[in-house]
Image: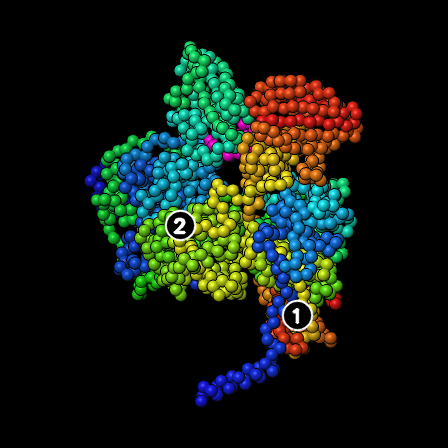
């Protein structure tokens, strides 16, 4: 009897729960963004390069040097086919279609290739630029090219790691490793653009024609990051400095950095030092950032149009980055977006239908997932997740916008927000701890009239620090929680005036 | 009034005591308090009490050697034993003993040895020290004259070694003049001992330092010698060393080098040897030789010629060699070649001459034999140089600083022996047959509140003066107070902490927030032995939080006492070995302190579970083999800890939670969390249960070295990724051995393969049969330069195919290893529509050249045809084609040549071919002047081999 009643009560509770709180049931990323998988079980699809062709098909290059056209990429995955287009390239890690050619940065050169006789596979391979050296080390990968607004092609060059049998006898390494360069696509002339890169696995042009790149944490790059690449920048790694004599001004005046300096103070030591746009805190926002693409779909890929998506080779995730320019410096926040891909991701690429193609390989770098390689596709289901939409810095805090109007009571309670700040040193050691940590007090949370924005007042902001925000308890109007309640804003500069 | 000890042969204890009481207040010497690096880690830490630190000092300063205490108290104290002096005479110079005993702290900064004579009258002290010196030097026989010498190279080697294996953890960096009081000083060593004695000590420190504070580092004789030469390096500049004769040992020294892409003898001065040793014969059969190709050896020593006269030396080698005497090249047999003899003559005086033989092998067969014809001998071939005429200098002599003749006096020695007993030296340094002549108060009777005794502001005459720092005195007093109460046995946690402080484990290992190398040390002196992308985990010894729960107790013991289960092969810092007693005590204590994991029995074994585990470990699963070696096989990318050691080392109950969340054990770990949020990426295997999946990995690893290899591992020596040109050619860019990092290979279905070096722009290699294994650069992080898979490999000239020459006799360019574009600028290639065969393009100045290599099938095997087409945009004069190069070239027909036994070439052109056959140095060359008067030309070369 007693038992029975209990059961009745629990049934009642369940029914009530369903009635009242059914919509608060936990939602998942897959409700909003779905992953489709192309069958690559028997094809070593270690994707290193991808681009959307002008005919709408996808060109996919593998780290083993094979290139395929993915025919019918937008329908059911099982209907798509991989058609061999070229082979024998040396680690192609980026494609760009330009004037009928496919440009690719291989290990030894920037190459352009095309199918001249129209038989469906490439037959002409031209060396555009091979002005950099190779010491014979596996880690001498090159990424790109991406074209800037002036029509030059940018390439980022990895530094080696280990044996260098063909090192230049004078500098005991190869020239131009650890640099970003740009190349004239016709003449092949190469121009040094920025020094101090470590393992710049992603390079991308922004909608406004600037170039950004991702770098992997390690020695002298003590937290993974996204950085804006501009002529004359120095990004912190000393490896490439012996090439400064070839590079000329302003690179020839960069001294060896002093290990242990706070990142925010590095410009005092080296004026050319460039702070990142966004740091990706270790393990929280991945471990190894790679490919990146801006959402230029104007809403076809969901509510994040104009924002940047960055892949991670270790966590098999795609994260989201929102940027703003403060006092001339590009900076912003990174936020979780989608996890659960089948392997560590190297390249992402938007298709014609605004789905995101995701190419991966774990060769050489362990990571999450259940396959050694793969090509997947991320589609927006049409449902809008309740997410932080943007995070912008203010002189005394941040403004958050949301993808939906918020529940005013929960969103205006400062206790529902927690903020911690920390920074990094530039050091010779590998990686680096989140240093000089401090919890920051949220003094006020003010919801905008249209309820889509919340103004956070923070006591007090710290320039040069990551501001890690955790939101718990903020709900939308239907009292759902956020899909992801965290954001990591790299506050290089504090704005002087309030802006929207 | 000083006592004349010399007159008083019957010297009694009463006299001795009065001698100790003589007072001289004028002595002021710069000293430092006792240096105890392990103790220093406990300072300024809120969790560590003053009495805990003081208890450590009671042991390390051996207070209870004089102040007896009850067993419960002594059990907590862990009394250090002072050096065993029973053979001190054979280790230390008399001069050092004298200087040191007069004022230990002034002579060895931070020494733990107290000053006994701090309040003695100088003459009395000097007399006592003289007798003690005579006594001590009589123990164990006299320090032998040094046999081993040193060299700048050995100093460098020892320096590198000292600063990489972890000596700095206790002794601090030795590269700067200023000493850091944190570290145990070594500055005095050059006057203390010899290379021989120090090497012996370093190889077995517990013989003379029984309590293991200086641990066993398992040094071999060579390592110990290099370290000793480094530590005693000041002796190299000792005027006494400079005046001494260098010793010699039989045989030649050799150095072995591994260098890729060799085509001539390297400049050895710029290179670091992969291995060194000595040999009594000039032979390639050295124990260190690992490679068959791409290595070089240099043999160096002295040749002792019996008479004056003209000597002929002969070197027969494959590939190059050279004989040098007194810095002069006598036989030059350099370059890539088959077995070839060269000889040279030189007039030599009788006696010692610097003698050196250099050798390298690029690829293929290897051979070296060196012979001579001494004056008056007959026979064209020469005879081997008798091995007793070849010696190596043992190095520059190294004599301890300020060495002086010392004549031992038995009578003084006897008096020294009595002083040794009477003054209580024997309390700390026990010697057979000697007993302390007096005892101090018991420990419990000492009153810490009284400002007196060893801890007083002024130390009374006759008492040992430790030169303690204020905080050390305070800590000792706190410990005295604590010990006067109850003395419970040390808890396991206390035992762990005490062990780590006493033996300075904290120098390298962090635990409970204590210890670990300082940032400054970590940055400079904690390295990997080769470049491995493991981050700080690869360099810094692991933290010991949870270690008691992690390790199997037996494994921990073995790690502490031997190098068994030292699995971090990439870490330069060497984990020392400690005594079995210590290992027992420590492993038991840490096991109890950390608590055992929730389960200690692994899952029950089943083949099915092991098979799942095998799948997870391979690329079919979590791909653990990306970063972990397995059963002796290389990992795909990072050569991390071999997984076959896991089962012996760690407990299953630790393994599971660790695998599920590695970052909980080390936030900076590179190890991925394969089950994020407790979810398996393999929901269909074992019900998607993370626990069961980890258990299956454990089950698989329990097979240890007999485990079947997981998918993804290709056993050494097997072909992993063979490229097979089945129906059309494969053009493939890669790294290739002897071709370079910008190699472009083509494999034709006709079983002809060609490899171009587009760093230089030249055809480098052709071969028949199987094409190429591209796993050298395509698997994981490999950058192995692999060679051809097939057979009939023919190496073509190192220089470019085309070059402009000022004159027909001008030198053909010979590019160095890293030279670029000697043969033009590579412009790419196209694949011919009809057969997909490549046509390569390159520009040499104003001439655009295309080159189409093609197979020509014929009986006896496919041959190569190279068709060139040249277009000049402006008048191009003086362009030549190098059609062949070799020692012997024979012209068979006007346009047909035979190059040694290696190959034949035939030539055709759109212009009349007028070959030039010329001798250039040791080789002959066939040059074809290219006629570009028409603005364009074609040329065809067939190579048959």
Looking at the picture, do discs 1 and 2 lie on one chain? no
Q: How is the image coloured?
A: rainbow
- Numbered disc in front, either 1 or 2: 2
Quickly name the residue at label 2. B706
Quadrant in the picture for the N terminus of chain A:
bottom left
Q: CA distance from mark 1 to mark 2?
A: 51 Å
The residue closer to the viewer here, B502 or A145, is A145
Is residue B11 toward the left or the right of residue A178 in the image? left
Tell me the SS state at disc 1. loop
Q: Is residue B16 above or below residue A446?
A: above
The outermost residue toward the front is B859
Is residue A120 toward the left or the right of residue A485 in the image? right
The residue closer to the viewer here, B830 or A406, is B830
What number is the disc on residue A385? 1
The residue closer to the viewer here, B181 or A52, is A52
Q: Which residues are magenta?
A: B255-268
Tell me the SS state at disc 2. helix
Q: What is the magenta segment's predominant secondary structure?
A: loop
Residue at 69% over, 30% down? B867
Q: Is residue B169 visible?
A: no
What number is the disc on residue B854? none
Total number of numbered discs in the rendering = 2
**Do residues under tags 1 and 2 come within 8 Å of each other at their CB atoms?**
no
Measured as percent of width and height from the top left, residue A5 is found at 48, 88
- Does the magenta segment cover residue B263? yes
Measured as percent of width and height from the top left, residue B92 is found at 34, 38
Measured as percent of width and height from the top left, residue A38 is found at 62, 58
The residue closer to the viewer here, B49 or A91, is A91
Measured as percent of width and height from the top left, residue A335 is found at 64, 63
Quadrant for residue B726, please give it: top right
Q: Is residue B13 visible?
A: yes
């Amino acid at each position: 009897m007693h038992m029975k009643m209990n059961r009745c009560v629990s049934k009642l509770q369940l029914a009530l729960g369903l009635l009242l709180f059914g919509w608060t049931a936990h939602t998942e990323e897959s409700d909003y963004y779905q992953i489709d998988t192309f069958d690559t079980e028997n094809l070593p699809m270690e994707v290193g390069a991808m681009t959307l062709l002008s005919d709408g098909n996808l060109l996919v290059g593998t780290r083993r040097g094979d290139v395929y056209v993915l025919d019918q990429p937008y329908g059911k995955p099982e209907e798509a086919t991989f058609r061999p287009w070229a082979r024998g390239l040396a680690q192609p890690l980026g494609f760009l279609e330009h004037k009928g050619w496919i440009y690719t940065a291989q290990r030894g050169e920037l190459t352009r290739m095309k199918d001249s006789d129209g038989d469906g596979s490439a037959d002409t391979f031209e060396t555009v630029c091979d002005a950099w050296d190779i010491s014979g080390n596996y880690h001498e990968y090159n990424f790109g090219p991406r074209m800037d607004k002036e029509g030059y092609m940018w390439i980022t060059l990895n530094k080696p790691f280990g044996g260098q049998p063909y090192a230049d006898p004078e500098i005991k390494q190869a020239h131009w490793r650890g640099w970003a360069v740009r190349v004239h696509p016709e003449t092949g002339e190469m121009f040094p653009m920025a020094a101090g890169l470590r393992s710049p696995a992603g390079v991308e042009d922004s909608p406004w024609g600037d170039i950004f790149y991702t770098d992997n944490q390690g020695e002298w790059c003590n937290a993974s990051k996204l950085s804006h690449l501009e002529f004359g920048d120095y990004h912190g790694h000393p490896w490439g400095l012996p090439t400064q004599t070839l590079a000329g001004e302003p690179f020839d005046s960069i001294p060896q950095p002093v290990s242990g300096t706070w990142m925010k103070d590095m410009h005092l030591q080296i004026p050319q030092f460039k702070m990142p746009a966004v740091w990706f805190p270790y393990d929280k926002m991945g471990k190894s950032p790679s490919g990146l693409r801006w959402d230029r779909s104007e809403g076809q890929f969901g509510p994040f149009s104009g924002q940047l998506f960055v892949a991670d080779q270790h966590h098999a995730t795609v994260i989201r980055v929102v940027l703003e320019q403060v006092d001339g410096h590009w900076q912003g926040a990174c936020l979780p977006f989608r996890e659960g891909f089948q392997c560590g991701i190297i390249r992402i690429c938007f298709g014609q239908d605004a789905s995101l193609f995701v190419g991966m390989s774990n060769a050489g770098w362990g990571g999450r997932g259940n396959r050694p390689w793969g090509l997947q596709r991320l589609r927006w289901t049409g449902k809008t997740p309740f997410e932080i939409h943007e995070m912008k810095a203010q002189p005394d805090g941040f403004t958050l916008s949301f993808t939906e109007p918020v529940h005013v009571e929960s969103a205006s309670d400062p206790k529902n927000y927690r903020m911690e700040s920390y920074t990094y040193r530039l050091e010779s050691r590998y990686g680096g701890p989140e240093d000089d940590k401090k919890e920051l007090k949220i003094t006020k949370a003010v919801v905008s009239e249209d309820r889509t924005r919340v103004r956070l007042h923070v006591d007090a902001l710290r320039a040069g620090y990551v501001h890690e925000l955790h939101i718990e308890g903020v709900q939308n109007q239907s009292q759902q929680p956020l899909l992801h309640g965290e954001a990591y804003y790299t506050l290089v500069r504090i704005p002087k005036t309030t802006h929207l | 009034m000083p006592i004349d000890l010399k007159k008083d042969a019957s010297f009694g204890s009463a006299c001795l005591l009065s001698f100790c009481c003589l007072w001289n207040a004028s002595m002021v010497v710069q000293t430092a308090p006792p240096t105890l690096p392990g103790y220093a880690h406990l300072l300024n830490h809120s969790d560590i009490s003053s009495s805990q630190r003081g208890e450590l000092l009671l042991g390390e300063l051996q207070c209870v050697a004089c102040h007896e205490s009850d067993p419960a108290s002594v059990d907590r104290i862990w009394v250090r034993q002072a050096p065993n002096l029973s053979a001190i005479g054979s280790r230390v110079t008399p001069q050092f003993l004298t200087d040191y005993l007069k004022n230990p702290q002034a002579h060895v900064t931070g020494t733990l040895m107290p000053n006994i004579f701090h309040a003695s009258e100088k003459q009395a002290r000097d007399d006592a020290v003289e007798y003690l010196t005579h006594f001590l030097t009589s123990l164990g026989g006299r320090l032998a004259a040094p046999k081993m010498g040193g060299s700048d190279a050995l100093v460098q080697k020892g320096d590198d070694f000292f600063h990489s294996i972890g000596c700095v953890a206790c002794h601090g960096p030795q590269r700067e003049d200023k000493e850091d009081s944190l570290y145990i000083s070594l500055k005095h060593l050059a006057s203390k001992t010899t290379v021989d004695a120090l090497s012996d000590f370093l190889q077995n420190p517990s013989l003379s330092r029984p309590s293991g504070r200086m641990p066993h580092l398992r040094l071999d004789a060579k390592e110990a010698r290099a370290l000793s030469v480094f530590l005693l390096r000041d002796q190299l500049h000792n005027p006494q060393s400079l005046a001494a004769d260098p010793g010699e040992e039989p045989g030649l020294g050799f150095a072995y080098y591994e260098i890729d892409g060799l085509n001539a003898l390297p400049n050895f001065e710029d290179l670091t040897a992969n291995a060194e040793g000595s040999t009594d014969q000039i032979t390639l059969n050295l124990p260190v030789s690992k490679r068959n190709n791409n290595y070089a050896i240099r043999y160096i020593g002295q040749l002792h010629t019996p008479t004056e006269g003209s000597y002929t030396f002969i070197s027969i080698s494959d590939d190059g060699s050279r004989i040098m005497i007194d810095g002069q090249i006598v036989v030059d047999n350099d370059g890539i070649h088959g077995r070839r003899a060269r000889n040279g003559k030189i007039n030599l005086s009788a006696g010692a001459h610097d003698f050196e033989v250099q050798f390298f092998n690029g690829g293929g067969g290897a051979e070296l034999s060196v012979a001579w014809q001494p004056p008056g001998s007959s026979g064209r071939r020469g005879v081997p140089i008798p091995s007793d005429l070849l010696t190596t200098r043992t190095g520059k002599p190294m004599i301890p600083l300020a060495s002086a003749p010392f004549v031992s006096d038995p009578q003084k020695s006897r008096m020294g022996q009595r002083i040794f007993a009477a003054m209580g030296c024997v309390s700390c340094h026990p010697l057979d047959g000697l007993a302390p002549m007096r005892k101090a108060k018991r420990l419990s009777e000492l009153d810490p509140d009284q400002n007196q005794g060893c801890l007083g502001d002024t130390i009374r005459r006759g008492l040992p003066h430790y030169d303690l720092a204020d905080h050390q005195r305070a800590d000792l007093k706190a410990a005295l107070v604590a010990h006067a109460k109850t003395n419970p046995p040390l808890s396991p946690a206390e035992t762990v902490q005490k062990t780590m402080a006493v033996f300075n484990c904290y120098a390298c290992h962090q635990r409970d927030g204590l210890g670990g190398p300082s940032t400054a040390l970590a940055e400079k002196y904690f390295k990997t032995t080769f470049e491995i992308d493991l981050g700080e985990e690869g360099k810094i010894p692991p933290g010991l939080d949870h270690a008691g729960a992690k390790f199997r107790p037996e494994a921990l013991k073995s790690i502490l006492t031997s190098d068994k289960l030292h699995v971090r092969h990439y870490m330069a810092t060497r984990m020392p070995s400690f005594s079995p007693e210590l290992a027992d005590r420590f492993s038991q204590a840490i096991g109890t302190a950390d608590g055992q994991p929730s389960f200690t029995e692994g899952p029950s074994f089943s083949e099915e579970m092991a098979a799942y585990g095998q799948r997870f470990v391979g690329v079919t699963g979590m791909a653990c083999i990306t970063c972990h070696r397995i059963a002796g096989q290389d990992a795909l990318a990072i050569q991390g800890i071999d997984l076959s050691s896991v089962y012996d080392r760690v407990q299953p109950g630790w393994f599971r939670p660790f695998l599920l969340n590695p970052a909980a054990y080390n936030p900076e770990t590179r190890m991925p969390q394969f089950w994020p949020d407790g979810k398996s990426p393999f929901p269909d295997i074992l019900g998607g249960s993370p626990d069961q999946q980890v258990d299956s990995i454990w089950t698989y690893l329990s097979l240890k070295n007999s485990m079947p290899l997981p998918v993804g591992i290709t056993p050494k020596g097997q072909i992993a990724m063979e490229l097979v040109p089945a129906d059309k050619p494969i053009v493939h860019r890669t790294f290739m051995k002897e071709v370079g990092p910008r190699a472009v290979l083509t494999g034709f279905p006709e079983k002809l393969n060609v490899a171009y070096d587009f760093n230089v722009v030249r055809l480098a290699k052709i071969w028949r049969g199987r094409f190429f294994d591209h796993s050298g650069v395509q698997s994981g992080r490999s950058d192995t330069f692999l060679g051809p898979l097939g057979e009939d490999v023919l190496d073509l000239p190192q220089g470019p195919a085309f070059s402009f020459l000022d004159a027909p006799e001008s030198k053909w360019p010979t590019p160095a290893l890293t030279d670029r574009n000697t043969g033009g600028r590579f412009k790419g290639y196209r694949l011919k529509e009809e057969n997909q065969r490549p046509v390569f393009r390159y520009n040499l100045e104003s001439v655009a050249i295309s080159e189409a290599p093609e197979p020509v099938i014929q009986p006896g095997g496919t041959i190569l045809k190279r068709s060139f087409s040249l277009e000049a945009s402006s008048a191009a004069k003086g362009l030549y084609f190098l059609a062949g190069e070799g020692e012997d070239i024979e012209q068979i027909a006007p346009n047909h040549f035979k190059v040694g036994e290696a190959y034949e070439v035939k030539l055709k052109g759109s212009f009349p071919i007028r070959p030039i056959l010329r001798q250039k140095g040791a080789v002959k060359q066939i040059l074809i002047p290219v006629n570009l008067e028409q603005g364009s030309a074609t040329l065809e070369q067939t190579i048959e081999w």
